[in-house]
Amino acid sequence: MDTFNTTKELIMNTPVPVQTRTYKPVSHSQLIDLTLDSISKAGFTLDKETYSSAVDGQVANGRFSISNVADTEMQLQIGWQNSYNRSMSLKFAIGTRILVCSNGCVSGDFGAFKKRHKGDIQDFTPTAIVDYIKSAGDVFQKMQKDREAMKQVQITKRTKAELIGRMMLEEQFIQSTQLNIISRELQSPTHDYGAKDSLWELYNYTTFSMKETHPSNWMNNHIKAHTFFNSCVEEISPAGISEEELMRSITQLSIF
């Protein structure tokens, strides 16, 4: 399987394209500096920073996990996606990193923005990044609730097969490569997610299979996955999970 992981130095040294009347680049280097500075000013502690790229650095992702916004299973993760070849807009999202396996979960309906490389992007981006990182604690709490709701939805082997088919054929955020990985995880799991035969377990098998997704698709596909599994909570368990039940199940949250 191809790997797109790279170093900070390589993407920082990728030549930034020339600005034109209709195109205003935001450099990978600027995004890294803005993100790290905003994390520090928000009072968060950086744990890991990881980068991936494609097309000789023309497309790049940065992901930053936070050690002091975490519980026993996952920690806050801040991510962005940028391009120099005009193939996509700048995207910024807040999600989580699963500690046992380093899987990523990205929320698209809360804590995400995208902006085309034109107009006021160079002025808008610094302010937006600071504001989004300041709200990251709220996003993390939402992701905790999403996780606990998925844990409480038990699914049969047939339901798993139906959901996998929909992910591949209808939603199209997994392909044959990911399908093979999910199948192997169902037969012989690499990690224990503490909720056997639950929607949460299948979600993690799915994000585990998406680790080597092309950088241009990584964020969008993870947002699609999170949206899909959230919708399945209500679909499979129409009665829903009460707020009190969810909060009871969330333990050892630490935000400073």
Image (cartoon, grey):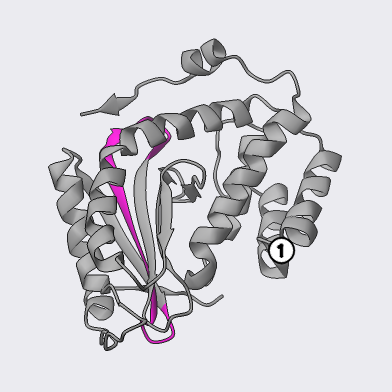
Q: Which residue lies at the image location 47% right of the left edge and 73% below the top edge?
A: 88
| Up/down of 124 relative to 25, above or below | above
Q: Where, by quadrant of the figure, is residue 131 drawn?
A: top left
Front-most of 221 and 119? 119
The residue where tag 1 is placed is 180
Q: Which residue lies at the image location 25% right of the left edge and 67% below the top edge?
A: 122
Place of residue 143 in the rendered image (x, y in percent of width and height, measured from the top left): 47, 35
| Up/down of 70 relative to 24, above or below | above
Which stretch did the figure color magenta? 54-75
Q: Is residue 202 visible?
A: no
Front-most of 155 and 132? 132
Q: Is residue 211 left or right of residue 238?
A: left
Does residue 45 belong to the magenta stretch? Answer: no
Place of residue 163 in the rendered image (x, y in percent of width and height, measured from the top left): 77, 47
For the stretch drawn in magenta, the main secondary structure is strand
Place of residue 208 in the rendered image (x, y in percent of width and height, measured from the top left): 56, 54
Q: Is residue 45 visible?
A: yes
Q: Locate the C terminus and report the quarter of the image it occupies.
A: top left
Q: Amino acid at mark 1?
A: Asn
Q: Which residue lies at the image location 28% right of the left edge and 72% below the top edge?
A: 26
